[in-house]
Image (cartoon, rainbow, N blue to C red):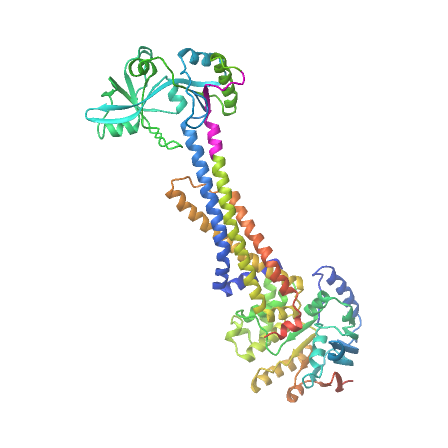
Amino acid sequence: MLWATLIMSLREVRKNALRSFLTMLGIMIGVGAVIAMVTIGEGATQKVRSDVGALGENMLVVSPGAARRGPERTAGNPFQKDDVEAIEREVTGIKALSPTAQSSTTVVFGNQNWPTSVIGVDDGYFEVRGYKVEMGRSFSEVEAASGTPVCIIGKTVRDNLFPGTMPMGQRIRVKQVSCLIVGLLASKGQAAMGGDQDDVVLMPLRAFQRRIAGNNNISSVYLQVEEAQMTSSVQAQVEDLLRERRRIQPGAVDDFNVRNMQEIADTMSSVTASMTGLLGGIAAVSLLVGGIGIMNIMLVSVTERTREVGTRLAIGALASEVLLQFLVEAVVLALLGGILGILFGLSLSYAATQSLSLPFVISPGTVAGAFAFSAAVGVIFGYLPARKAARLNPIEALRHE
Amino acid sequence: MAELPRPDGGAAAHHLGAALGQAELRPQTPIVEFRRVEKIYGEGESEVRALDGVDMRIDPGEFVSIMGSSGSGKSTAMNMIGCLDVPTSGAYLFRGVNVCNLDQDQRALLRRHFIGFVFQGFNLLARTTALENVELPLVYRRVPADERRRRALKALDLVGLSSRAGHTSAKLSGGQQQRVAIARALVTEPSLLLADEPTGNLDSARKVEIMELMVQLNREHGITVVMVTHEPDMAEYGTRTVVFRDGKIISGNR
């Protein structure tokens, strides 16, 4: 019976193709909007996660200065070599570590110059940040220990100082120091917060301290934790250790901070997720409007087909069967609208994610939810018209003009 | 000819099937029996006695024409015979079952299994083929699709329209539409065919065709026919004519 009713409903939808399509349009736009919003939002969330991940996996950054935002950020004393050694010795769960010192300066090759970040690093830095040497080599132990002025440059620096020529073996000038290029970094692209991770010149920390900075300060320490769940434990150990070494009283504000990249990623993706929810919710309102459209058309249809209902009742249809018929018709309209809406929403979000260069992620839960929701809209808004049809008196319905 | 109701439609049908099964045991039971049937519309000043204590009996195999001017009660009687309406007082027995005791759904099941309707305005579904129109009552009887099709084609063949099975009603003439409607009424093999002014919308040549078809169904297939008409020459096709006036039968009763 349900199957036969379904066939009948599809026929009814086809008979009034234009009207049916216009009725579906409301649901289609509603479902399409929800799907598009959610899909684009999911793409944005995933983009944020992968960008933050690209800064370095399971990474902690220890820097001097209190972790306060805004202009009154207090400066703390820089770290020294023995701080790093203490961390390495006493904190468990660290996979790799690198002290760094950094300076923003202009590097020169021939008549080209380029303002960039020059960072003095240890071997561990490549592992922590996920940098790979694409061509050439990493720093040798001798170079690292002796402070030989050698460097490895990122793609942006290479493109700006050496357009179309091979930088390997050339010397660039960093401040007063002439520095031999021994390697090129593979490109890492844009970071989550807009920084260009390829706009960098790396040199051995010792060389940087001696020849560029002129002191032995360490401006930050990069740590990579063995496993993601150990991040907070390692963070706590580092904080305790440094508090002790820097003699900070209990209750006093730390003069250093440990940034957890995972935490930043979580915060940012929860922000995008709630934006997604909000936009999806607004779009869902249009589904309600679509449902009212269905109810309206079904009421018109019942009035138009009063004689048909009378005939059906006369030849032996039960009131419940008439109810079912009109209900199924409403659900068919809503579901067809929902399916079209899903296709519409997915193609819309595909276009949007392509142009915003976000990943295109189809969330099966959302698609299934949209489908179920449009069926529910059909049942809810189809019930009143269907009940109206089922309650018709057959004698009067047959007389209806 | 008539089949027992199948156990569809839930408990109501089951109950009904038992009741009608008993009726089946007595072959001499009249198909239609009115016992002092009254039907009153409205109250007080505006009260209208559409039927005023009518006794009537129609036996299997009869072809009864019902005549009367408008307001005579013939349409009310017709609705009552078709179990679309129930008496205000008195009793209406359909195949020995008191229809007054049945609820709306049970009466719908009676119509589904025992009564075929033909209307003045044909009442075919718009933009639907002749075949699909004829199949419709079988859909409600849960007949499987292939058997539905076979039986509908057979019914269309009986009314001489098997070649038009795929035509929608808009492409059929009035006479053809009425024959499709008759096929729709016949396809369930009802024990009673109820025709309400079946020739009212047709020209005289078509009228004769339709009436000859009804007579043929009555004589050759043993279907009891009750037809309302206001045209005396149509009424003459029947085996008996019952005339209503002011809610009473004035002639043709037995």
- Residue A196, placed above or below residue A5: above
Q: Which residues are magenta?
A: A250-268
Residue A395 lies in the magenta stretch: no
In the rendered view, tell whether residue A335 sits above or below residue A156. Answer: below
Whether residue A255 appears in this view of the structure is yes
- The x and y percentages for residue A205 are 34, 16
Residue that lies at the very extreme toward the front in this rendered image: A72
Which residue is pictured at 54% across the width and 61% down the height?
Answer: A10
Magenta stretch: residue A267 in it?
Answer: yes
Residue B235: image location, x then y, percent: 67, 86
Residue A25 percent coordinates (x, y)? 48, 57
From this viewpoint, which residue is outermost toward the left? A111
User: Where is the C terminus of chain A found, in terms of image quarters?
Assistant: bottom right
Q: Quadrant of the N terminus of chain A?
A: bottom right
Whether residue B186 is visible, yes or no, is: no
- Quarter-of-image position of residue A128: top left
